[in-house]
C-alpha cells in the first residue's frame, strides 16, 4: 500500500480537492484512511434523495469514508455542529473547508478499482480487480 | 499488512457477510479501513442496552469501525437518514444492504487478535498478540 | 507503514492514553485506522466553541479519526447514546472508557508530521514532510 497525506486549506472544496489529488497521483485503488478537520459549508445528498442539500455553519468532520479511483470518488461524511448534533450523507462538490482537513489516503498495489453501471441498482458500482503481483510490476 | 477489498450487493447482511469473509480468508488481525454504502434496514444494539433495535428506511453508511478475527467481529456503525439525522451503535446481524457496500479491510501480519472473557467487564474482550516476525513466517 | 494495536481498559482516558502511546512508541506520522469501543464520559470541544462540554452516560464509539505525531494528537470522535442519537466533536482529555476501546494505528515510514502555527487560521496546523526513502533508513 502506498500512503498519501495532504492538508487542505481554508475555503477549498473537499470533494473536488480529493478528486483532483486522485487524478494527479494516478490513484487506482484508493481509500480514505482517516480525515480530521472542519467545514464551513456542507453539500450532501441525503439518503434516498436525488437533490443535494446545503448546510451552512461551522462543522467538525467526525467521519469521512470511501474509495477513490480514476473513475471517480465515492465518499460519505459525518459532521457535527456547535451542539454536537451530527448529520451525514453522500459528499458532493460544494463542501468547503473551514480551517483545515488532514487527510490520509491508502492506495493498494494489489488492486484496481473501476466503476460500471449495475443493472440491479442503476448506479455505477465498484468493480474490484485483483492483481496477484504488485500492480506496478504486473 | 494484507489488504482485502469487497463489494456487497443489495439484500445481503452486512455483519454476516463480513464474518463469512473473515472466516473464508482466515483473517487473524483484521480491521475496517473504510466502508461506504447504504442500508435498507439496520439492526443495532444501542449503548447500554441488551436488546437489538431495528430501524427500517434508507440510510447512508457514514462510518464503520471495528476489528475482525477468527473469534468473531466487533463492529460499530453510524448511518444517516433522508434528513441527514445520524444514529449509531453496535452492528448486529439483520442489517441489510440497500444498493452497495464498498469495504476495505486490513490484516496485520505482525499481530493476532483473539477474545477472552474479561472479568472486569463481563465481555469477551480483545487480546492482542504481537509477532516479532511476519506472522506467515513465524 | 507500521501498525500498532492496543486495547484500552475501563476508566482510562482515551485522548491521554493515545498521546502517551504516541510518545512511548515515537510515532511520527500516525493516524487512526479504526477504533471500536465505548465511553462513560465524553469531553468534547464542539464546532466553533472555545470551551469543552462534558457528556455523561453510556456511549458507543462509532467513529474516531485523526493524526498523531510527537507534536500532539488531533482527534475527532462520534459517539451514540442509548437511543442511537449521535453527537461528535473535537476529542479532549477527560473522555473516559466504559468497557473497552480497541484501537489500530498506522505510522507511515515515508512521512513525518509536525505542527506549526498557521497565520490564516490561528491554529497549529499539520505540516507534512515527505521522505523519498523509508524514514528509518534516511
Image (tube, coloured by chain):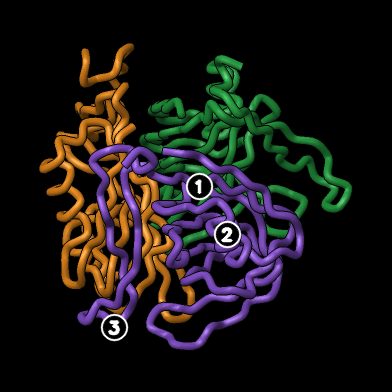
Chain colours: A orange, B green, C purple
Q: Residue furthest right?
A: B119
Q: Are marks 2 and 3 in contact (CB under 8 Å)?
A: no
Residue at position x 88%, y 47% in the image: B119
Q: Chain of mark 2?
A: C
Q: Residues within 10 Å of mark 1 (few under 14, many from 20)?
A: many
Q: Is residue B53 left or right of residue B5?
A: right
Q: How many circles with numbers are drawn on the protein?
A: 3
Q: Which residue is mark 2?
A: C18
Considering only order in the chain, which callout, 1 or 3, is on the residue closer to the N terminus?
A: 1
Q: Which residue is mark 3?
A: C122
Element class at badge 2: helix
Q: Nearer the viewer, residue A127 or B57?
A: A127
Q: Which residue is mark 1?
A: C105
Q: How far separated are the C-alphas under marks 1 and 2?
A: 10 Å
Element class at badge 1: strand
Q: Are marks 3 and 1 in contact (CB under 8 Å)?
A: no
Q: How far separated are the C-alphas under marks 3 and 1?
A: 28 Å
**Rendered location of residue B88, percent (x, y):** 55, 56
Position of residue C41 relative to residue A120, above or below, is below
**Rendered location of residue A7, percent (x, y):** 25, 60
**Rendered location of residue A19, percent (x, y):** 16, 47
Q: Residues within 10 Å of mark 3 (few under 14, many from 20)?
A: few
**Rendered location of residue C59, percent (x, y):** 65, 63
Q: Residues within 10 Å of mark 2 (few under 14, many from 20)?
A: many
Residue at position x 43%, y 59% in the image: C69
Q: Is residue A134 left or right of residue B88?
A: left
Q: Are marks 1 and 2 in contact (CB under 8 Å)?
A: yes
Considering only order in the chain, which callout, 2 or 1, is on the residue closer to the N terminus?
A: 2
Do marks 2 and 3 share a chain?
A: yes
Position of residue C35 relative to residue B5, above or below, is below
Residue A138 falls in image quadrant = top left
Amino acid at each position: 500500500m502506498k500512503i498519501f497525506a495532504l492538508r487542505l486549506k481554508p475555503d477549498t472544496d473537499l470533494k473536488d480537492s480529493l478528486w483532483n489529488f486522485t487524478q494527479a497521483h494516478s490513484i487506482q485503488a484508493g481509500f480514505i484512511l482517516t480525515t480530521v478537520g472542519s467545514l464551513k459549508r456542507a453539500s450532501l445528498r441525503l439518503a434516498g434523495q436525488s437533490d443535494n442539500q446545503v448546510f451552512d455553519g461551522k462543522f467538525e468532520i467526525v467521519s469521512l469514508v470511501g474509495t477513490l479511483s480514476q473513475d471517480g470518488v465515492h465518499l460519505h461524511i459525518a459532521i457535527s455542529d456547535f451542539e454536537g448534533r451530527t448529520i451525514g450523507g453522500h459528499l458532493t462538490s460544494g463542501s468547503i473547508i473551514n480551517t483545515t482537513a488532514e487527510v490520509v489516503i491508502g492506495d493498494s498495489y494489489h488492486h484496481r478499482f473501476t466503476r460500471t453501471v449495475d443493472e440491479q441498482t442503476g448506479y455505477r458500482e465498484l468493480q474490484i480487480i485483483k492483481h496477484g503481483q504488485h500492480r506496478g510490476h504486473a
